[in-house]
Image: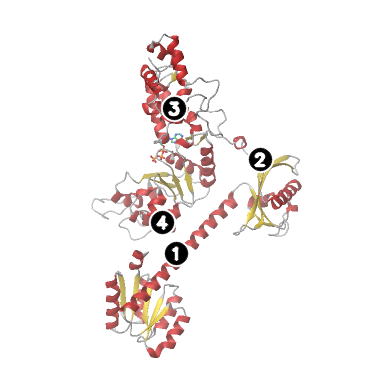
Amino acid sequence: MEHDLYSAHILIVDDEESIRQTFEIFLTSEGYQFVNTVATFDQAIEAIKNTTYDLIISDIVLIGPCGTDLLKKTRELNIKCPVVMITGFPNLETATESVRHGAFDYISKPVNKNTLLRFTRQALLHWSLENKAEGLLRENEKFRRYLETIFRSVSDAIITIDANMQIVQLNETAEQWLKDKGAEGLYDLDQFPEEVGMACLNDARKVLQDGTEVRKHLIECHTADDSTKIISLNASPLRGEDDEFQGVVIVARDMSLEEPREINEIRNRFHGCVGSSRAMQEVYKMIENIGKVDTAVLITGESGTGKELAAEALHAESSRRDKPLIKVDCVSVNENLLESELFGHRKGAFTGADRDREGMLLQADGGTLFLDEIGDISPRNQLLLLRFLQEKTFTPVGQDTPLKVDVRIIAATNVDFQKMVSEGKFREDLYYRLKVIEVRLPPLRERINGIPLLATHFLTIFRKQLNKKIATISDQALECMASYQWPGNVRELRHVMERACVLCDGPMLLVQHLPDELQNPPKKETVLQSSPPFPHHHDHPVELFSISPHYQREDEKIINALKQVNGNKVKAAKLLGVARSTLYRQMQRYNIEE
Ligand SMILES: Nc1ncnc2c1ncn2[C@@H]1O[C@H](COP(=O)(O)OP(=O)(O)OP(=O)(O)O)[C@@H](O)[C@H]1O
């Protein structure tokens, strides 16, 4: 903020040269970088038209039209920056009058340095706060429009009812459900098919009484053409700012339109993503919903969690799917070249620019631009990107006129953005603009239920690639995968599976084919390995190390095997299906005597 104040543009208007000079010196010596001075009303108007000023300081008395005329003219030109008047004693009346006309304040002559600096600072602080408030308003408006788009575009009927059971709002789908349209804009629950109207009324009353939601109320609805529809209703209380009850929102879904998978709800794949964990179901649903709207999206998640795959899925879910998806890895492009890479350049714009170059934004016109590792871009590129998001226009390096394109931006990062913003490394305004919609990809350790499916997916890929006959993965190997922390996430799992497939020559992928760090998970987690790690239903967190009577403890298993073969470790290892080295390690770990 302090820093911004000094880069403000200040215009001094005074017909006395000595005053102009003194004011300019006072301000520039304080650190203000852009101070311009003019002598007359006409010169001031000319200056205002050429430059956007943040503050105008004008003498009331000028040769020709006066300072108050200048004030009025600026307002006519829709310039809202603060105007401070300078006045001599006889003109005090005019000065107070000008404040009534919208001047920020006035200073009486003679003006000393401290007074000038104090007024300048106050006016600029006020202006900066006002701009910030306006920015927030604009953000709010954008968010409102975004919600409205969703409200309009969803295929569920959304009905809002006030505390008197009167409909206050319907979305388009709900309007289509009305059997009798009635007078424009006036709706009643009676206008819906009878069963729907009644169910809405009853659910709304229940919400009103208990103050809690009614979820998945399934009703039959008999239509005019004698078919039966199944409608699922959800009713939630609508509360105002101070939590007081304002009504009920009912979301009704025609289940007969649903694809069977949505009733069943678990999806194992979504575009290129594989994963059945609950966390990934949320991600799929989110991508499906936001694919349809055009807002910028920020994908966050640790390295290797599938951010690029998510961006591809988002593009495929959008109406832009037949247009290009252009990907830029912001860290792999040289910082200085990124600007021309994104925005393009004209021949001769810089040394080495020997011909015009079309930037990625232009290539993505009509489609999507995926900016990977956006946290790493320079402040200048952050600014240019912000401008593009605000205005949808950009200017290639070395060109005067801006170009307009229709491109959706999807950005991804694996760094803690909020921290970068608070450390001043990333622009807050750009951050907020990007994060209106955020898709967070959970790290692999938070979705261990999905590991068997992913591992099998990679097994299928590499088995084919390497021409192997590996049919499956042992439960113990899966247990090791479940208790590992996966710093490299799915990418690391992919590598682990590739390596294991190379090493494995039998029909089953075993613990011995896994890297050491997976075979030896941290001590506390290896005390017991008993129940199978993955229950058949995927939607409950897995209890990895509970004791089950059907499974022997690992140390007992080893002792028994050793007993059976009279302590012969080669034979015992074979019996247990592990490498001899693994057996030695396990014996050490469990303190089993030779
Ligand atoms: N859900 C998934 N299903 C199948 N493969 C996946 C999944 N998630 C990630 N992968 C695979 O893991 C690797 C890394 O994925 P991706 O490049 O999308 O991750 P990222 O989050 O963009 O990584 P980084 O932050 O390092 O750029 C790729 O080979 C990708 O195909």
For marks 2 and 4 on the same chain, the one whose residue lies earlier in the sequence: 2
Which quarter shows the C terminus?
top left
Q: Which mark is residue 526?
A: 3
Kind of residue sitting beneath label 1:
Lys
Specify which label sits upstream in the sequence, 3 or 2.
Answer: 2
Distance from disc 2 to disc 4, alpha carbons, whole Å, reads 43 Å
- Foreground label between 4 and 3: 3
Q: CA distance from mark 2 to mark 1?
A: 46 Å
Q: CA distance from mark 4 to mark 3?
A: 45 Å
Residues marked 2 and 4 touching at CB (< 8 Å)? no
Q: Secondary structure at mark 3?
A: helix
Percent of width and height locating residue 424: 36, 56
Task: Say which mark, if any, is on residue 255.
Answer: 2
Q: Which residue is mark 4?
A: 428
- Cα separation, mark 4 vs mark 1, equals 12 Å
Q: Which mark is residue 132?
A: 1
Precedes in sequence: disc 4 or disc 1:
1
Q: Secondary structure at mark 4?
A: helix
* Three-letter code, disc 4: Glu
User: What secondary structure is found at the residue carrying circle 2?
Assistant: helix
Res 321 visible: no
Residue 48 location, quadrant: bottom left
The disc, 4 or 3, on the residue closer to the chain's N-terminal end is: 4
Location of the N terminus (image quadrant): bottom left
CA separation, marks 1 and 3?
55 Å
**Residue at point 45%, 13% (across, down):** 561
Q: Are marks 1 and 3 in contact (CB under 8 Å)?
A: no
Q: Residues within 10 Å of mark 1 (few under 14, many from 20)?
A: few
Element assignment for label 1 = helix
